[in-house]
């Protein structure tokens, strides 16, 4: 009974947080509006269904369930409080309209160029991975396959397709050519959607939807109607669950024998279920006393960018060899609980943080919530590069809530750094004389029109 009360507590905390956020901001893109339902799904609806079907009995006992759910409730509470503490009153959208994007032909051209270059690099990486496996049909002719390359930069490089789209939407809002902007948005969307839909991947599908929807409205200082947003959110949620449910049936050449019911995502109890696996990770880490104390996260920032061809044993030498298996989130489940987590399983954000920093995970959830809230406030009041950054971290929200910090850290850096560089370059155009900012391609090389005339 106590476990059920703790499950309901998650709904109460999130509901109160969402109401306060919307009442204060009147913004359907406030972070709690879209992260809240994911927290409820993972920490209420999924375990509620599993508990009442007795699906968790073979994995965890009642005392263990109460223990881990207490942690999850505190983590959700900390995230909500942190997000709200960043401030929910960013001023009226109409008043801040001038901050959303500056109508500047100079800046728009540079944003357009930056978006095209980022997208082209991403497309090239995607093409290389597809070529390596024999072509498009071979890449997507079996379930959950896709392209491949031994070089991690090439494998992850397709993420720059999203960066390109984010910048192109900003360029379009700033006054760039509609023809060029839309041509490249479509061109970069096709390879991204092919790997999202044909591989039935929920993260990339969610990310693309957020980039297109939030990027389009946010850059214009507008918001979709509440009813439209609610319907869109429910539709996107169903699509994500549909892809997960039918992952084995979606590929080129399949007979599309799909199941329209998505209940098995939450009804099926197995060692790969996010709630069960995450709970097992928490219990095991606590029993063994094994925590990483930020080493995995530091490795994602400092060690992962170093090519394995240069340093083959980089993770072992850094002391985080476990990161190569389920991102190090199985600290000995089989030893403590007698069952093994499934390969490729993810524990959810709170369990991942607990495995990293013990009960300080609650404080860390508060910091994450504050970070989301602060990024939203900066985007709503300052716009420009902050809008692009907020769109990027929002597009990765499903990776964060449902998987691990490791799934987010490197992706955030790869998406954000080119975006910030482009925005800094674009903003610089606003301070240049007219003859330098426009009509002279040599300015891309750092030469002014006056200097070129003397070359």
Image (cartoon, grey):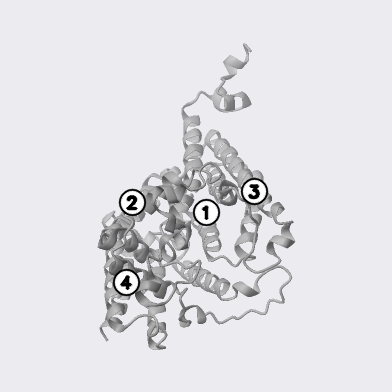
In which quadrant of the rendered view does residue 339 lie? Answer: bottom left
Residue that numbered label 3 is attached to: 123
What whole-number distance in Å separates the C-alpha atoms at marks 2 and 3?
32 Å
Q: Is residue 41 visible?
A: no
Residue that numbered label 2 is attached to: 374
What whole-number distance in Å separates the C-alpha atoms at marks 2 and 1?
21 Å
Q: Secondary structure at mark 4?
A: helix
- Answer few, some or many: residues within 10 Å of disc 2's Cα (few below 14, many 20 plus, some between 14 and 19): many
- Answer few, some or many: residues within 10 Å of disc 1's Cα (few below 14, many 20 plus, some between 14 and 19): some
Kindly check if marks 2 and 1 are in contact, taking CB atoms under 8 A apart as contact.
no
Q: Earlier in the sequence, mark 2 or mark 3?
A: 3
Q: Which mark is residue 264?
A: none
Task: For marks 2 and 1, give the one nearer the viewer.
Answer: 2
Picture quarter with the C terminus: top right
Residue 424 on image: x %, y % = 46, 35
Task: For marks 3 and 4, give the one nearer the viewer.
Answer: 4
Picture quarter with the N terminus: bottom left
Residue 435 on image: x %, y % = 57, 22
Residue that numbered label 1 is attached to: 216
- Which of the pair 141/220 is nearer the observer? 141
Q: Earlier in the sequence, mark 3 or mark 1?
A: 3
């Amino acid at each position: 009974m106590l476990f059920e009360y703790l499950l309901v507590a998650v709904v109460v905390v999130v509901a109160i947080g969402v109401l306060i956020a919307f009442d204060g901001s009147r913004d359907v893109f406030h972070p709690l509006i879209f992260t809240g339902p994911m927290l409820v799904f993972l920490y209420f609806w999924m375990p509620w269904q599993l508990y009442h079907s007795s699906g968790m009995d073979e994995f965890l006992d009642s005392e263990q369930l109460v223990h881990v759910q207490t942690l999850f409730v505190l983590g959700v509470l900390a995230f909500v409080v942190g997000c709200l503490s960043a401030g929910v009153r960013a001023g009226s959208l109409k008043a801040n309209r001038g901050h959303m994007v500056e109508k500047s032909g100079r800046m728009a051209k540079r944003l357009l160029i930056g978006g095209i270059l980022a997208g082209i690099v991403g497309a090239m990486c995607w093409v290389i991975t597809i070529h390596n496996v024999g072509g498009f049909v071979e890449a997507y002719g079996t379930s959950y396959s896709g392209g491949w390359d031994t070089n991690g930069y090439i494998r992850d490089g397709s993420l720059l397709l999203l960066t390109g789209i984010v910048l192109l939407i900003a360029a379009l809002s700033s006054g760039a050519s509609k023809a060029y902007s839309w041509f490249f948005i479509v061109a970069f969307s096709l390879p991204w959607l092919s790997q999202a839909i044909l591989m039935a991947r929920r993260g990339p599908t969610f990310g693309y939807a957020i980039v297109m929807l939030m990027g389009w409205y946010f850059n214009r200082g507008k918001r979709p109607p509440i009813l439209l947003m609610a319907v869109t959110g429910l539709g996107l949620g169903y699509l994500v669950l549909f892809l997960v449910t039918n992952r084995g049936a979606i590929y080129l050449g399949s007979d599309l024998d799909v199941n329209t019911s998505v209940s098995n995502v939450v009804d099926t109890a197995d060692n790969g279920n996010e709630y069960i696996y995450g709970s097992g990770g928490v219990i095991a880490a606590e029993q063994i006393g094994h925590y990483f104390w930020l080493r995995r996260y530091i490795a994602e920032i400092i060690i992962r960018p170093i090519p394995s061809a240069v340093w083959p044993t980089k993770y072992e030498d850094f002391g985080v060899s476990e990161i190569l298996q389920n991102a190090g989130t199985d600290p000995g489940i089989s030893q403590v609980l007698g069952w093994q987590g499934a390969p490729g399983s993810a524990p959810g954000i709170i369990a991942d943080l607990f495995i990293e920093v013990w009960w300080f995970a609650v404080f860390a959830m508060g910091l994450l919530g504050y970070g989301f809230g602060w990024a939203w406030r900066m985007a709503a009041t300052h716009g420009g590069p902050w809008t692009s950054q907020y769109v990027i971290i929002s597009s990765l929200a499903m990776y964060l809530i449902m998987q691990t910090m490791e799934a987010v850290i490197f992706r955030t850096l790869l998406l954000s750094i080119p975006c910030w560089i482009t925005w800094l370059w674009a903003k610089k155009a606003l301070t240049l004389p007219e003859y330098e900012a426009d009509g002279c391609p040599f300015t891309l090389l750092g030469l002014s029109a006056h200097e070129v005339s003397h070359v």
